[in-house]
Image (cartoon, grey):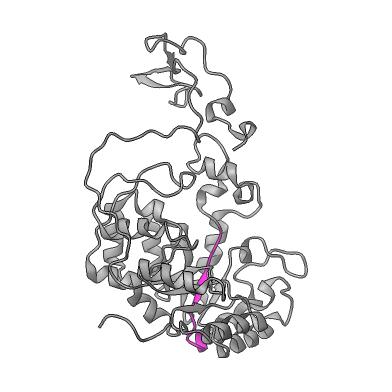
C-alpha cells in the first residue's frame, strides 16, 4: 500500500494530547466527557489515559503474534459433502479440470454459480456444463431479465416469461443481487424497491415452479455508519470506497424492512436469505426473522467473522434452526474454505481469520454435531433447491 494511503486512526483524529507521550510513567490525561480516552491515548489506570512513548504502528502494520499455546485442528476437507449454494464461479474449458481437483480436495460436491445471467448467455453456460463429465457438479441460478435495469409497466410479465424459459434451459433458481432494491433505478428514475408490484409476477412464477429465490439485500450494517474510529469495519471501508453506504439516501433499516415485507406478502415463494440477512451479528434478530417467515432459510456466505467470534451463541442458534441454514461461501478461494470447516466442525480457540480487513479479531470453533453439519452442508440445500443433483450423497 502506498505510504500516502496508510493513515492511522489516531492521525485522522489529530495529534495526541500533551503530557501523555513518554516514558510509560508520564503524566496522564483524564477521560473525555463521553467516558472515552482522547484520540491517540489509551486507558492505563482508572480515569487516566496516556499516549505511547513511541509512534504507534498503523492499523495495517500492527500484526501482533500471540503467545497463546492452544490445541489446533486444521480441517482441510469438510467432514461431509458440501453444496456451496452461494458461489460466483463456474467452469470453462480452461478451468474445469482445476476446479474439480480443488473441489474434490475440499469435499465440495456441488458448486452453485449465482451469476448465471439470463437468456442465451445462461443457456450457453448450462449447455457447456451438460457437455462435460461433470454435469452433476455445477449448477446455475438465473439473474432476471436485464438484471432489473429497465423496470416499467409490463416488465414483470416479461421477466416472469424469461424466468420460465431459463428454468426450461436448466436454471435451478433465481438470484437477486444487492443492487436491486438499493441502487437500481426504474425507467422513471425512482429507486426500484424490492416490493414494487411490477416484480410480483416474478415471485409468483418462482412459487409456481417450486423455484428458490436467493436474495441479497443491502450491505453489512456497519457500512451504513460513519467512517470513524468506532466503526469496526474501518479498514475495509477505507480500502474499498464503493462499500461506503453512509452517505446514500436509503438506510439499512429501510432496505431490510422492505425485504421483510416481501417475505410476508409472498408466503408461497421460498427465499434463501443471502449472508444471513446481515444479521449474524444479532442472532435474536435473525431468529425473529425466521420465526415470522416460514418461507425463508438463511445461508452463511461471507459472515464467518461473526459466527467465529460468538461460537456459543452461534452453536445454539444453529442447533435451534438446524433445518433452516445452508452453507455458502461467496468468493471461491480454495485456501479459505478450511476456515469455515474449522469454525463449524471443531472447538478450536483463538485462531486467525483469513482476511485482516474483514475482521481484526480471532475465530473460535462452534463444534457442531454431525447431524447438524450434514444439514448445513448439503441436506437442507437438497430440500430447498429441488434442481440440485439427487445422486452421490451419503445414505
Residue 264: percent from left, percent from top: 49, 73
Residue 75: percent from left, percent from top: 30, 58
Q: How many marks?
A: 0
Residue 237: percent from left, percent from top: 57, 44
Tell me which corner region of the image, top left, top right, bottom left or bottom right, holds residue 196.
bottom right
Q: Quick one: quadrant of the N terminus? A: top right
**Does residue 30 show up?**
yes
Q: Residue drawn at (31%, 67%), measured in percent from left and top?
A: 321
**Does residue 281 show up?**
no
Q: Quick one: quadrant of the C terminus? A: bottom left
Magenta extent: 207-218
In the displayed structure image, the side of residue 296 where residue 367 appears, left or right: left
Q: Is residue 195 magenta?
A: no
Residue 123: percent from left, percent from top: 61, 84
Q: Nearer the viewer, residue 284 or 78?
A: 78
Q: Is residue 209 magenta?
A: yes
Tell me which corner region of the image, top left, top right, bottom left or bottom right, holds residue 371.
bottom left
When the figure is inspected, residue 214 is found, relative to residue 387, above or below; the finding is above
Amino acid at each position: 500500500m502506498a505510504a500516502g494511503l496508510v493513515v492511522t486512526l489516531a492521525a485522522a483524529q489529530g495529534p495526541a494530547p500533551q503530557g501523555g507521550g513518554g516514558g510509560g510513567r508520564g503524566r496522564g490525561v483524564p477521560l473525555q466527557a463521553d467516558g472515552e480516552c482522547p484520540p491517540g491515548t489509551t486507558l492505563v489506570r482508572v480515569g487516566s489515559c496516556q499516549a505511547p512513548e513511541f509512534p504507534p504502528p498503523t492499523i495495517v502494520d500492527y500484526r501482533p503474534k500471540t503467545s497463546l499455546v492452544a490445541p489446533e485442528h486444521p480441517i482441510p476437507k469438510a467432514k461431509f459433502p458440501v453444496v456451496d449454494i452461494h458461489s460466483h464461479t463456474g467452469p470453462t474449458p480452461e478451468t474445469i479440470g482445476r476446479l474439480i481437483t480443488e473441489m474434490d480436495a475440499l469435499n465440495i460436491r456441488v458448486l452453485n454459480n449465482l451469476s448465471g445471467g439470463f437468456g442465451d448467455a445462461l443457456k450457453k453456460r448450462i449447455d457447456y456444463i451438460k457437455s462435460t463429465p461433470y454435469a452433476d457438479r455445477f449448477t446455475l441460478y438465473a439473474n432476471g431479465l436485464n438484471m432489473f435495469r429497465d423496470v416499467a409497466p409490463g416488465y414483470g410479465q416479461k421477466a416472469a416469461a424469461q424466468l420460465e424459459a431459463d428454468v426450461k434451459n436448466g436454471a435451478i433458481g433465481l438470484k437477486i443481487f444487492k443492487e436491486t432494491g438499493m441502487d437500481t433505478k426504474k425507467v422513471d428514475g425512482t429507486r426500484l424497491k424490492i416490493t414494487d408490484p411490477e416484480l410480483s409476477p416474478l415471485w409468483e412464477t418462482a412459487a409456481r415452479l417450486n423455484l428458490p429465490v436467493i436474495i441479497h439485500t443491502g450491505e453489512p450494517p456497519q457500512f451504513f455508519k460513519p467512517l470513524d474510529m468506532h466503526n469496526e469495519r474501518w479498514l475495509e471501508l477505507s480500502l474499498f470506497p464503493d462499500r461506503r453506504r453512509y452517505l446514500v439516501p436509503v438506510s439499512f433499516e429501510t432496505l431490510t424492512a422492505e425485504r421483510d415485507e416481501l417475505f410476508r406478502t409472498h408466503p408461497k415463494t421460498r427465499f434463501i436469505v443471502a449472508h444471513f440477512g446481515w444479521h449474524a451479528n444479532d442472532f435474536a434478530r435473525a431468529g425473529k426473522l425466521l420465526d415470522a417467515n416460514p418461507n425463508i432459510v438463511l445461508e452463511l456466505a461471507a459472515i464467518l467473522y461473526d459466527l467465529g467470534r460468538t461460537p456459543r451463541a452461534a452453536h445454539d442458534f444453529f442447533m435451534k434452526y438446524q433445518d433452516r441454514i445452508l452453507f455458502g461461501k461467496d468468493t471461491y478461494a480454495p485456501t479459505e474454505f478450511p476456515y469455515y470447516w474449522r469454525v463449524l466442525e471443531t472447538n478450536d480457540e483463538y485462531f486467525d481469520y483469513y482476511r485482516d480487513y474483514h475482521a481484526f479479531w480471532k475465530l473460535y470453533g462452534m463444534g457442531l454435531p454431525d447431524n447438524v453439519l450434514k444439514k448445513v452442508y448439503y441436506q437442507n440445500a437438497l430440500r430447498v433447491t429441488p434442481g440440485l443433483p439427487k445422486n452421490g450423497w451419503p445414505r
